[in-house]
Amino acid sequence: MSGPARTGFLGQPRWFGTLFVVDLWERFSFYGMLAILYLYLVADPEGGGLGLTEADAAALSGLYMALVFMSALPGGWLADRLFGARRATLYGGLLITAGHGLLAVPSEGWLYPGLGLVIAGSGLVKPGMASMVGRLYEGRPERREAAFSLFYMSIQVSALLAPLVTGFLGETVHWHLGFGAAALGMVIGVICYAAGWSHFGDVGARPERPLDEGELRRAMRRAALFGGVPAAAVAVGAVSGALPLERVLMLVGLVVVAVPVLYYRSLMRAPAVGPAERVRLRAMAWMLSASSVFWLLFAQGPALLNLFARDDVDRTLGTFVVPASWFQSVQPLFLLVLSPLAAALWVRLGRRTGAPAKFAAGLLLGGSAFVVMAAAASAATQGRVSPLWLVMVYLLLVCGELAVAPIGLSLAAEVAPPGHAGRMLGLFWLFAAVGAAAGGRLAELAGVVPDAVYYLMLAALGLLAGAALAAASGVLRTRLASRAGTPAPSPTLRDPTHK
């Protein structure tokens, strides 16, 4: 596939700007929801909240984040085999719009259907757009990394504004008004996307490996049997009260952990995957496992760090009390400022520094963030602390994110077997889902051990994972560079998904 040669938005092809508008509002949806969901779940019912325990709220918000990531797997498959990346992005935008419309209804009963539509729509938008952007720089990984970093920077404008809008509306006016704030924005985004359709040339116009009629019927039967029936059973059990929330969260969490292992193994057996591709995919499994550790750390922000901001941070500015959710805007602000520097750094380093070393640096930075957080929690035992503690934590997490997320997306596009780009990008977000779900469940420990001890445990996890990846970076880099027709290096690392 190739895009039009004309350039426009930020020196990229004109369709890059059209994709940016849609992703602007998809990110508004994601970050705006994360900013207030946990606070809404633990808020007193008299104040319009659900009144859940902190443990259940952390698990539920972690699973929401996980399912947004996880939905990229079926979304990527649909983009590759049925819709094509272009239509997948359009349909995803429409689903997100509908989901936020339901969330705007001031009734508890619409929360879960609304979340479900937002999750489904995000699953189509993420791999669809990433696949189209990845087509710009085939065979030029350094330029692709820079392009993904630039794209990552651009959407942070929305991520910066989202908690300010949803947080203010949710915490000071009405929670459901905060949830529904992105509905109008997504309408604008979808209209702009449709208007810019002609800018795409042939990029994403057709599925890379279209299904024939027989394959489509089989896929629909399997989706109904393995997806629709279990989901309906869980939904009926939850609504009727026969299946408590804790059991539902546990079941969904088990699915989130099992699916990436099963999917990875099926990908390894695909006809398009030869010996050289298997070498690369085994190495990629280590990279994806490392990224899940980072997303576990990241998942603490919308839950426990939000709670820390609400209960332990001095948020007064004169007579104004800053909403706790506004601290979620610190992260995208740093991303907006630092992403151009990261993009320039990757181009300058070129091939001298491989993706494994960048991932290792990201994990070390993530671990360091929670060393700072442990110190903040210890200081908070004496009273409310300065907001600068949280600012420093988010700065370190952002530096880690810039070394993991755009690099991981670029690497996934690079190592994808022929015809599997969308699903490989979906697999990247699937491992992120494992980290987010595990982070939500791990947050339950915060009610058992002192906060400072809990954050030190997280710090140790990030630092140890980063050190291990740094030690193996040379071997992993060699395997990730394997190409068809080149001999596979002798194995010295076991496949982390192999049982």
Image (cartoon, helix red, strand yellow):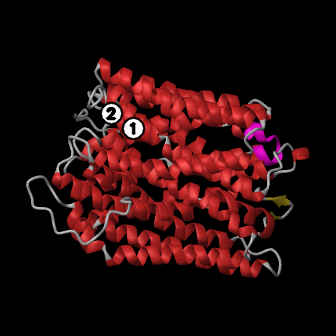
Furthest residue toward right: 46
In the displayed structure, 7 sits above or below 144; it is above
Going by the numbered disc 2, the residue's amino acid type is: Asp
Residue position marked by numbered label 1 in the rendering: 76
Question: Per the image, is 272 magenta?
Answer: no
Left or right of residue 169: residue 279: left
Left or right of residue 309: residue 9: left
Residue at left 49%, top 29%? Answer: 225
- Marks 1 & 2, CB-CB < 8 Å contact: yes
Residue at left 69%, top 48%? Answer: 247
Furthest residue toward left: 485
Mark 2 packing: few (<14 Cα in 10 Å), some, or many (20+)?
many
On residue 80, the disc is: 2
Specify start and end residues of the magenta stretch as a single range.
Answer: 170-178
Secondary structure of the residue carrying numbered label 1 = helix
Secondary structure of the residue carrying numbered label 2 = helix
Using the image as rendered, state which of residue 113 and residue 168 is in the foreground.
113
Q: Quadrant of the C terminus?
A: bottom left
Left or right of residue 440: residue 460: left
In the rendering, at what x and y percent does residue 67 appear?
55, 45
Using the image as rendered, state which of residue 175 and residue 347 is in the foreground.
175
Left or right of residue 61: residue 381: right
Counting labels gives 2
In the rendering, at what x and y percent does residue 112 appear?
68, 36
Residue 330 visible in rendering: no
Question: Per the image, is 175 magenta?
Answer: yes
Going by the numbered disc 1, the residue's amino acid type is: Gly
